[in-house]
């Protein structure tokens, strides 16, 4: 997979057709940044339309079910996302782990189904505030990585990880750059244990209250290969400011 900085907007449960105008603005602006890989994960209802509206950015789903089809009312299978025009999917977001009881095992099955369907995958991990306060953040997160990442052949080639501390999501609070760096190094080490040399190519994104103002600093932390952005990805101006901060020309 590419080694460009990867900036992904997760729109969560936000967006109706009127939001396509914002996606077009993001797409136009992204064309000026050929050293950054930009993508959006809109609600599933917009994937097809958004994919038809853009040329320069990736389009993905926010979740998928592990099964290919069947009696699972309301759920979406990975091949359906692919058919709708998605090229990636986010799995294991903390809002799904907490809200729907998704376990590492389920997340891993989803990730493997996504790869099987021809999608790339972003596996999310992150500790709660209580886990950080009790000094267990690294143990929790590396255990999540070990249990949630796909183990199928060549999985590392189409995999990214997003480290999103639960307490930093939507709160305006972010870990220190040193804490982000040490967590990303611990994740890299865990990935090396699983994928050996292939782990080097896996981008580890940071997510949780990434904004224009803090993006450059967070993206500069060790082993940070991009960002998974929630609130600030809903408007072109704030999202593109983060893309701009990720541009290697900017970092020099
Ligand atoms: P915020 O950027 O709104 O904190 O959300 C982060 C997130 O959960 C992205 O997946």
Image: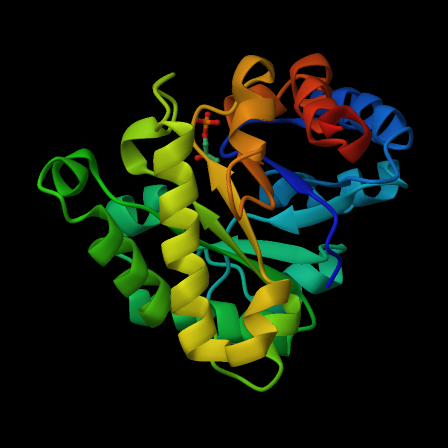
216 or 57, nearer to the observer: 216
84 or 38, nearer to the observer: 38
**Image quarter of residue 226:** top right
Image position of 137 with respect to 75: above or below: above
Q: Is residue 36 left or right of residue 136?
A: right
Image position of 177 with respect to 77: above or below: above
The spot of residue 161 in percent (x, y) is 50, 55
Quadrant of image for the N terminus: bottom right
Query: What is the count of numbered marks?
Result: 0
Tell me, yes or no, if residue 178 can be seen here.
yes
Tell me, yes or no, if residue 41 can be seen here.
no
Extreme residue in the left direction = 134
Q: Is residue 223 left or right of residue 97?
A: right
Q: Name the residue rendered at 51%, 36% in the picture.
A: 221
Q: Name the residue rendered at 66%, 24% in the picture.
A: 242
Q: Name the residue rendered at 22%, 47% in the picture.
A: 137
Q: Is residue 245 left or right of residue 110?
A: right
The spot of residue 169 in percent (x, y) is 37, 29
Q: Name the residue rendered at 86%, 43% in the picture.
A: 52
């Amino acid at each position: 997979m590419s080694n460009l900085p990867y900036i992904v907007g997760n729109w969560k449960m936000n967006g109706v057709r009127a939001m396509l105008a914002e996606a077009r603005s993001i797409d136009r602006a992204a064309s000026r940044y050929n050293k950054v890989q930009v993508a959006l994960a809109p609600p599933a209802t917009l994937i097809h339309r958004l994919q038809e509206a853009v040329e320069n950015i990736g389009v993905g789903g926010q979740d998928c079910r592990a099964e290919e089809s069947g009696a699972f009312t309301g759920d979406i299978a990975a091949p359906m996302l692919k058919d709708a025009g998605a090229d990636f999917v986010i799995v294991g977001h903390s809002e799904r782990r907490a809200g729907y009881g998704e376990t590492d095992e389920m997340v891993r099955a989803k990730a493997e189904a996504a790869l099987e369907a021809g999608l790339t995958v972003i596996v999310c991990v992150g500790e709660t505030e209580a886990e950080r306060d009790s000094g267990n953040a690294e143990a929790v997160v590396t255990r999540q990585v070990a249990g949630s990442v796909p183990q199928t052949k060549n999985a590392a080639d189409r995999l990214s990880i997003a480290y999103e501390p639960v307490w930093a999501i939507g709160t305006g609070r972010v870990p220190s750059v040193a804490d982000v760096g040490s967590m990303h190094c611990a994740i890299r080490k865990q990935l090396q244990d699983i994928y050996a040399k292939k782990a080097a190519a896996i981008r580890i994104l940071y997510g949780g209250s990434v904004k224009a103002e803090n993006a450059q600093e967070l993206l500069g932390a060790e082993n940070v290969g991009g960002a998974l952005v929630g609130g600030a990805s809903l408007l072109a101006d704030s999202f593109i400011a983060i893309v701009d901060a990720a541009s290697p020309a900017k970092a020099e």
